[in-house]
Image (tube, rainbow, N blue to C red):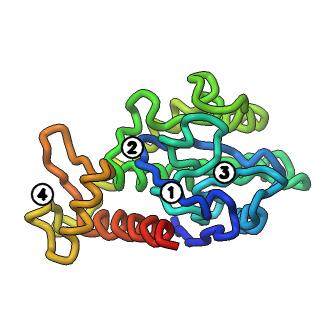
C-alpha cells in the first residue's frame, strides 16, 4: 500500500481544521462510477464540492494506492452525523460504467484489500481494536446506530456484484492483517512503553498526544508504540497544529 498525501486545502472542511481524536474508522464507497482516487481528490479540492460541505480523510483504489485528503486527526465531514466527530472516514472507489461485470468485481475486491491494509495500519497507530463494537463501521451501519445519514454503502455495492464481502468479514480481515503485521515486524524495531523510554526528540510530542487522548496505550498502561508509529502520529499532530495557526 502507498499513501499519497494530497491535502485538499481549498475544501471548507480542511480550512475549518477542527481537531479529531479518532475512536473509530468508517468505510464508504464513493457512490459514483469512478475507479480513480485522484479524480475524487480533484473534485474534493474545492470549497464546497457539488455545493455541499463534505470531505473525507482518504480515498482507496484497487491497485493499493491511497490518497490522503485530510490529516487523520482533523475532523472530516463524511457521514452527515455524529460519527464525524469520532471516526476517520475512508472512501473506496467504484467500477467505471464501461467495466465488464468480472472486471468490476475485481476492482471492488481490489479496493477492499487496500482498505483492509489501511484500516489495519490506522488501528495500529491509534490503538483501535477492529473487532470491538462500533470501532470499524460502514456508512449504513453508522445510520442504523443513529450516527450517520441514510446511506447503504458499502454493503450495497458489494451485494450488487456478489463479491461476498461483508462488514463482519472486513473487520475480521483487518484484525488478521494486524496480527500478520505483528508476526512479521522486525524483531529489533524499538518499542516504547512510556514517554521516558522514548528518544528525546519524540518526548514532548508524545506527551501532547497523550494529553489529547490520541495515544492511550494498552489496558495495563503501557504505550507499546514503535518508532515508526511515533513518527506517523507526530507528523499528523504537527499538521493539525500548523492548520490551527493559519
Q: Quadrant of residue 206?
A: bottom left
Q: Nearer the viewer, residue 165 or 36?
A: 36
Q: Are marks 1 and 3 in contact (CB under 8 Å)?
A: no
Mark 2, other Cα within 10 Å: few <14 / some 14–19 / many ≥20:
some
Categorize mark 4 by other alpha carbons within 10 Å: few (<14), some (14-19), many (20+).
some
User: Which label belongs to residue 92?
Assistant: 3
Q: On the image, numbered disc 1 is attached to which residue?
A: 74
Asked whether, in this view, residue 111 is left or right of residue 23, the answer is right
x and y percent of residue 100 in the render?
A: 86, 50
Q: Which mark sits nearer the N-terminus, 1 or 3? A: 1
As displayed, is residue 139 above or below residue 37? above
Q: Which callout, 2 or 1, points at the residue further toward the start of the chain?
A: 1
The residue furthest bottom is 201
Q: Secondary structure at mark 4?
A: loop
Q: Which mark is residue 194?
A: 4
Could you tell me how far apart the alpha carbons at marks 1 and 3 are, in whole angstroms? 20 Å
Above or below 163: residue 188: below
Amino acid at each position: 500500500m502507498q499513501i499519497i498525501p494530497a491535502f485538499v486545502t481549498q475544501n471548507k472542511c480542511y480550512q475549518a481544521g477542527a481537531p479529531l481524536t479518532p475512536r473509530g474508522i468508517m468505510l464508504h464507497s464513493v457512490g459514483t462510477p469512478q475507479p480513480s482516487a485522484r479524480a475524487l481528490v480533484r473534485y474534493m479540492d474545492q470549497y464546497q464540492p457539488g455545493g455541499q460541505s463534505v470531505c473525507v480523510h482518504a480515498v482507496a483504489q484497487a491497485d493499493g494506492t491511497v490518497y490522503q485528503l485530510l490529516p487523520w486527526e482533523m475532523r472530516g465531514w463524511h457521514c452527515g452525523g455524529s460519527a464525524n466527530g469520532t471516526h476517520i472516514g475512508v472512501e473506496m472507489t467504484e467500477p467505471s460504467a464501461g467495466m465488464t461485470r468480472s472486471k468490476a468485481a475485481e476492482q471492488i475486491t481490489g479496493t477492499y484489500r487496500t482498505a483492509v491494509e489501511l484500516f489495519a495500519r490506522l488501528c495500529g497507530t491509534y490503538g483501535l481494536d477492529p473487532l470491538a463494537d462500533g470501532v470499524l463501521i460502514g456508512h449504513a451501519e453508522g445510520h442504523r446506530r443513529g450516527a450517520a445519514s441514510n446511506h447503504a454503502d458499502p454493503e450495497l455495492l458489494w451485494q450488487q456484484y456478489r463479491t461476498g464481502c461483508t462488514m463482519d468479514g472486513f473487520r475480521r480481515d483487518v484484525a488478521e492483517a494486524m496480527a500478520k503485521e505483528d508476526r512479521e515486524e522486525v524483531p529489533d524495531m524499538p518499542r516504547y512503553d512510556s514517554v521516558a523510554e522514548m528518544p528525546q526528540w519524540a518526548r514532548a510530542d508524545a506527551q501532547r498526544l497523550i494529553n489529547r487522548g490520541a495515544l492511550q496505550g494498552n489496558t495495563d498502561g503501557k504505550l507499546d508504540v514503535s518508532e515508526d508509529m511515533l513518527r506517523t502520529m507526530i507528523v499528523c499532530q504537527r499538521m493539525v497544529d500548523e492548520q490551527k495557526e493559519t
